[in-house]
Amino acid sequence: MSLNLDSAKNIAKVLTESLPYIQKFTGCTMVIKYGGNAMVDETLKQGFARDIVLMKLVGMNPIVVHGGGPQIGRVLEQLNIESNFVDGLRVTDSRTMDVVEMVLGGLVNKEIVSLLNKNQGKAVGVTGKDGKLITAKKLKITGTASEHANGDEIDIGHVGEVVSINTEVLDMMKDTDFIPVIAPIGTDDEGASYNINADSVAGELAKVLGAEKLILLTNVAGVQDKKGNVLTGLSIKQVDKLIADKTLQGGMLPKVACALDAVKGGVHSAHIIDGRVEHAVLLEIFTDEGVGTLITKSGLNKD
């Protein structure tokens, strides 16, 4: 089907606008945390896959880290294993951890690999256990919710945090056509497995790899002010102010904390973007407007 003149001009505009970004970011590492609606809606899934393959094709080094909470929840329900949460974290006993490894390291990881490969990419799926990629330790928390307000330490099982990252496996793929897809499962020196928050894994990877960008896909438009306007071009100082005056609350806080930690750790920029928008990753990287919130050390706006 032939394009009309307006459509052709619009495509030409997008292509020319993207050229400086392609030139600037060739050879750069981009760590993308994939989750939310972008991971379940078929149109969004295809758009995400094409974005990642295109990034690799034009010389960037995309690394995908994925979650899978809803998928884990469904399988646990099918197996009549009760899901319990403490301060938003899934209590992960040994039986639940077996399911987490099966779903994240198997079903979800391989589905993403297959999706990228169907779109002419060369994806390789790994967990943090492969090549000792992610060394983890048990996450220790104290209760902050009302039912755990006494501040005692709470045992939530095989939930972990990153201790260190061995980049050897990823370094081998950097100058090849392969796209790493990482399930956020780590292991300690004794071989115990841990379920780790995917945002945290993505952030730690971005820091260790000296990534140009950390991109977190969410189910919201981005960081918003009290009137619901999306904010972008933010500095560390500006984000700290938004936290202090309680503009940022609830589920956005951990993502913002992850973004801040990455930028403070040397990542050039962190992006919290709307994964409900088709081709969100491509639009954020290759266009002037973007589709979410950009955070850098000094910001683009005046404090």
Image (cartoon, rainbow, N blue to C red):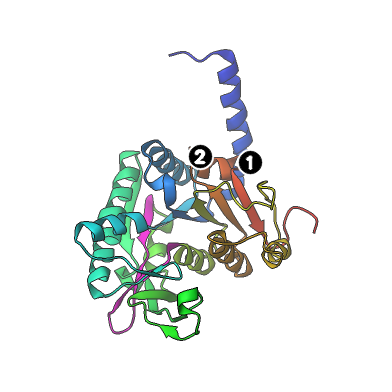
SS label for mark 2: loop
Question: Quarter holding the N terminus?
Answer: top left
Q: Which residues are magenta?
A: 177-198
Q: Nearer the viewer, residue 234 or 227?
A: 227
CA gap, disc 2 to disc 1?
23 Å
5 with respect to 174 (left or right): right
> Furthest-front residue in view?
147
Q: Residue at x 68, y 50 (%)?
A: 231
Q: Amino acid at mark 2?
A: Val
Q: Quadrant of residue 121?
A: top left
Residue at the spot of label 1: 20
The location of residue 57, given as percent across then percent down, is 45, 42
Q: Is residue 155 above or below residue 100?
A: below
Q: Which mark is residue 190?
A: none
Count of marks placed on residues: 2
Residue at the spot of label 2: 277
